[in-house]
Amino acid sequence: MSSKKNERFWDKVLEAVKEVVSGEQFETWFTKTSCAAIRDDEIVVEVPSKFYSEWLRRQYLEVIKQAVQRVRGVDGASISFQIAAIAHAGAVGSLPRTAALPRRSSSRDRGTQDRDRLPLNPQYTLENFVVGASNRLAHAASLAVIEDTGRVYNPLFLYGGVGLGKTHLLQGICHAVRKQQPDVRIRYIPCEQFVNQFIAALGKNRLEEFREQHRRLDILVIDDIHFLASKDHTQEEFFHTFNALYNNQKQIILSSDSAPKDIPTLEDRLVSRFKWGLVCEIEPPTFETRMAIVLKKARLYGVEVPDDVVEFIASAILVNVRELEGAVTRFLGFARIMKRPLSLETAKEALGELVSSAQRRVTIVRIVDLVTEHFDVRLADLQSKKRNHSIALPRQVCMYLARKYTKLSLAEIGGFFGGRDHSTVIYAVDKIEQLKKNDIELRSALQSLERRLES
Ligand code: ADP
Ligand code: MG
């Protein structure tokens, strides 16, 4: 139980946290925390589940420490986590849970029927999914959901731009569930198909059948749920399906191209339901992850590609994994048909047109070269999660200059610096513009950097 004093203290800490993490991150990771104890040398943070404590420890320990330090004005307290005594289900904002319902169908053949209906791509397995900073949370949450269906995160809502792996991950979950728990009735359906089936059922007076089909599932996976926008009747129907499944502790997994609140014309009651569970973003992959993906895709073709080629491809394609994959295929196809070795030369030739986009990278690479030299930091630090001033400032300077001197989009710039999102870049640009006004040292640094860039 946290006392009033703990509460007040924690509110202040959260205020400080809010200043350094994005709104979405705050919503996801901090709104469900509280302070269980304040000691001289230790702050005990109460969290809804083990997953939270692990994630907070891994990703946000420094952030919390610094916020605590700011509020207390003294250094050095350690942070520990404690899992709330109330059932974690309550803490994820859900309805009160009744006794666990049977999670499996008793009849095997019904399970089989549903399985046969899954139009899954056999390549989209979790084994083939490369995990990196940009998708680590989404991946971890997927694993948690497979482990504990309908309980930990319901719904699980994944969102992100085109070609960043949402469908792959969703289908990966389906493959895994199918393999580990063959009796579970799981259904993967692209939202467009859901809408079409609903409309067809309406027309043929088969609504009951349609409802029944979805409501007796253990896991319903709907891909591209933003497709529901402005389809009023379908939203209404989906709302009831959602409630029916949710109230029976059945798992709902959704993907979308944007966060719930940003899906146009999505009813508020759906927006709020989507936020009941866990909402997480899949961001553009970092350079490191792109290299891992190139390697993985090449291996799926049964070949090993030399490092310089991997690097070349990973720096030519900045954001979209589908395009990255396309580049690998093109390179390998070209080499085979033209009977060329798998070398950098061949890659440059095969990916000729893409190099023009690689050329744009020259500028950001040049920016990074100059900035890292000037501030004496490493690129790896700029791409890391580190937020201390000595790293954050040069990173923001890079973003500012990249915005000014390259044609890269905000998302591409953010992606380059460790899979950060466009809002981070906007923030960085604003920040530098502000600082420039009063900070003489920074202003002269910028002037000299810009002069060198322009030369
Ligand atoms: P989305 O549904 O987000 O538009 P997809 O899931 O269709 O994206 O992914 C596009 C392509 O990129 C797919 O072929 C997929 O296998 C591949 N892909 C995306 N992310 C990853 C990843 N992390 N590891 C391996 N392949 C990936
Ligand atoms: Mg998709």
Image (cartoon, grey):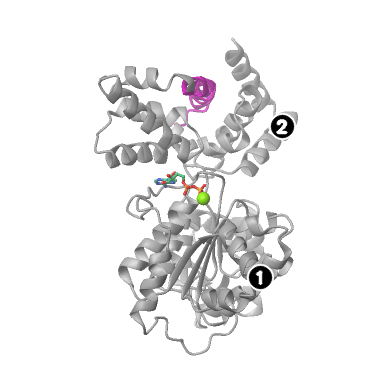
Q: CA distance from mark 2 to mark 1?
A: 56 Å
Instruction: Specify whether residue 382 is painted magenta.
Output: no
**Left or right: residue 286 compared with residue 22:** left
Quarter holding residue 142: bottom left
The magenta span reads: 354-378
Can residue 74 be spotted in the picture? no
Residue 222, x across and y down, in percent: 54, 62
On screen, residue 175 above or below 288:
below
Residue extending farthest top: 455
Quarter holding residue 241: bottom right
**Left or right: residue 371 compared with residue 185:** right
Name the residue carrying label 2: 433
Kind of residue sitting beneath label 1 = Leu
Return the mark for residue 202: 1
Label 1: how many Cα within 10 Å (few below 14, some 14–19, many 20+): few
Residue 431, x across and y down, in percent: 69, 37
Residue 437, x across and y down, in percent: 75, 29
**Left or right: residue 78 compared with residue 347:** right
The residue shown at (42%, 81%) is: 103
The chief SS type of the magenta part is: helix
Kind of residue sitting beneath label 2 = Glu
Task: Decide which of tag 2 and tag 1 comes sooner along the chain.
Answer: 1
Q: Secondary structure at mark 1?
A: helix
Quarter holding residue 341: top left
Q: Secondary structure at mark 2?
A: helix
On screen, residue 103 above or below 70:
below
On screen, residue 334 above or below 137:
above
